[in-house]
Image (tube, coloured by chain):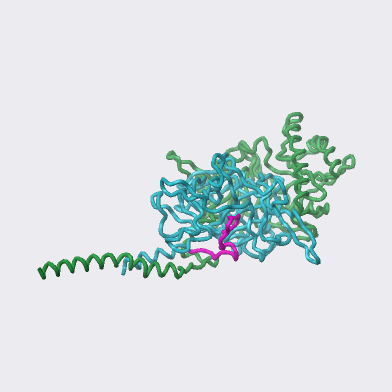
Chain colours: A green, B cyan
Amino acid sequence: MISTILINPINIKANSSDEIVYEVVKKNPNLEITVCNETYVYWQFNYRIFDPPVAVRGPGLNESTYIDKMPGDYLSEKGFIVDMLAAKYDLKHSNWYHYYLFIDSINKEIKPLQDKIFKEKGELGINWIGVWYTIPPSIVVTMYKITNEKVNIVLEYLKPYAKKYNAVVFFIEDYFPASIYEKQGEAVRRFYNKWLPSGSLEWGDGWKEYLKLVEEYYNLTMNIKGWVYAPGIANLPIPPNATFNKEFVEKAVSILRRYAGCEVPLVANFVDYLEGQVEPYGLPKNPSDTLRNTKLETPSLLDLITLFMIIPVAILLPIILVLRKANNNKKRKNFN
Amino acid sequence: MLVFLVYGSGIIYAYHVPAYPGYDSRYDPLIGGVQIEITGAIFGGPPDLFPYNICSLSFPVKIKGYNPPLDRGFITAGHCVRTGDYIDQPKKLSWFDWSNFIGRVRRNSFPHGGGTTNVDAALIYLAHCPGNYPCTPTRNFKPFIFENNSTPYFGTPDYNREVGITAYITPTKVMEDNVIVHKSGRSTGVTYGIIRQIDAEIQYSDADGNPVTLKPAIYVSRCDKRGVCFYDRHITLPHDSGAVVYIRHLIHSERIGNVYIYHYGAQVIGILVVGPTFGVPTRYFYATWAVLVKERWPDLELVTCGPDIGRCL
């Protein structure tokens, strides 16, 4: 069954419970495919339009700006939620070391809470509970399939801390419950990686099959040498500015699921194939690569003197001396 | 003559980006971020005639079980080097020069030839150990990171252009989209961006084209995808590999007359290893987790200037 989710600004529900302010933020993928567990589809070039514009505040900034559109990929949405909440609650930042240590101390205080909730109430789909480095501190809970019931359970545990530190509490929907996080990593790796009997590694069959699908739909051969993914997140390359194609997406997800399996929910994040390619930044460069203003290093004067004077003299001089000696010996012999 | 011409062509060994001002100077004691030059070892023995690569220094370590001063080491990116390579800082002045030699690569976690790893790092042992003779120390280090004053900081420049390493920290999910990190490396100096992901997995190729996977890795970007950027210049360039990635905190400020001076500290979080293949100016990089160096090699002590913060100024 495939259900399309409306592309709206984030659904936000502001609440206050016993003088504690909390927000519940749900995500809006472009598509949710539920054939084989849940696959949440994000498409970078499916821009989300905000009318009226939405206030956002980036990390480290204390001023807000307004945006009227946002790319449709998973990471953009994730970052947008953080920036939007910072603007809405006028969250500020401090660069001081002691403030960072203060937030770290709250994080340490709250950390055992997650284990306690797991033990007493079950895992509830929680990925992590932590505190953002903001003024005032903000307690964050990321959770899979947020419900009011689950929010209320967790709030009971968080209330003392929220009151103590005058913190706002944010519940943000995400797809990676801690209990299955490792399995989500393994699932994605089955798609990207293939271990040969010899023990060597190569690109997975699923990945190769997907690239063929792109070739078929977009007539584009992608020679990708470096690519990035994450537990539960399959980044799938698409051509720049490719329009959302539901048939292509369904086929791609079908390939992904054939290799990754149906055990865990996944994100299929379709992103620009040029932007996403990576390479190590510490390998000798190919001389033909002039992309980044590379320039040929000129040999030093000392190197040139060594090359054209010292080394030839060092090699030729003994040869000349030996030849001269041999010649002299020969002459002497002839003379005698 | 032909022999010499062929031989001479080998002298033009590296096709690389020029160093950011200040990063290719000689540092004694050694500090993080600055340039190193790498020369291969012929069959694991003597050094090759010319260097083959350039990278950046990350952070200092002490090797437990060794007596000072022969317990000093420095970390760089593993893919930059091979075990046994000879390292000079900032560079070899000529093929017979040993004045800038700082040590050889003792350990490397990068799977040259293909494979998977959780950390892309290598240990340079700061000593000269010729054959059967006893080792002698080469150069001292200090737990600081070099910063060039002309680069755009998030904040203000450090008063003495060096930030003290106060801690080595484990990345957490709570840092994602919420924490700004700086990096200091030889090609682009100090740049900064936001931590977008801490658990990325990268599949890429080593120098011979063999696939390698690195997990976990920290994704740092100076922009979001909606195109809003902190600044409009490269966040990284080739040969920044090994650059130290850190959270930069204000640890001290004071007013002297009409002038404020600032001292910053660094909580080291990663080592830069990977950047984008396309896109100018570059917008992001990936870093391997610094704390995993200690996990991989438990006999290493990651050196800080603390706990007394006064020693980090």
Q: Main secondary structure of the magenta part?
A: loop
Q: Nearer the viewer, residue B137 or A253?
A: B137
Tell me which residue sits at (45%, 68%) in the image: A299
Q: Can residue A297 be spotted in the picture?
A: yes
Q: Can residue A202 be spotted in the picture?
A: no
Instruction: Check the image and report above or below for A44 versus B19.
Output: above
Instruction: Check the image and report above or below for B223 versus B131.
Output: below
Please provide percent x and percent y for residue A239: 58, 58
Q: Quadrant of residue A332?
A: bottom left
Instruction: Tell me if B89 is positioned left or right of A3 in this view.
Output: left
Please provide percent x and percent y for residue A72: 68, 54
How many numbered marks are there? 0
Tell me which residue sits at (54%, 41%) in the image: B66
Q: Nearer the viewer, residue B11 or A201?
A: B11
**Name of the residue lying farthest toward the top:** A120
Name the image quarter holding the C terminus of chain B. bottom right
Please provide percent x and percent y for residue A117: 76, 32
Q: Which residues are magenta?
A: B15-34
Q: Nearer the viewer, residue B82 or A110?
A: B82
**Name of the residue lying farthest toward the front:** A336
- The question of residue B17 being in magenta is answered with yes
**Name of the residue lying farthest toward the right:** A19
Q: Quadrant of residue A40?
A: top right
- The question of residue A261 being in magenta is answered with no
Instruction: Check the image and report above or below for A306 versus A216.
Output: below
Instruction: Tell me if B195 is positioned left or right of A186 in this view.
Output: right
Please provide percent x and percent y for residue B234: 62, 63
Name the image quarter holding the N terminus of chain B. bottom left
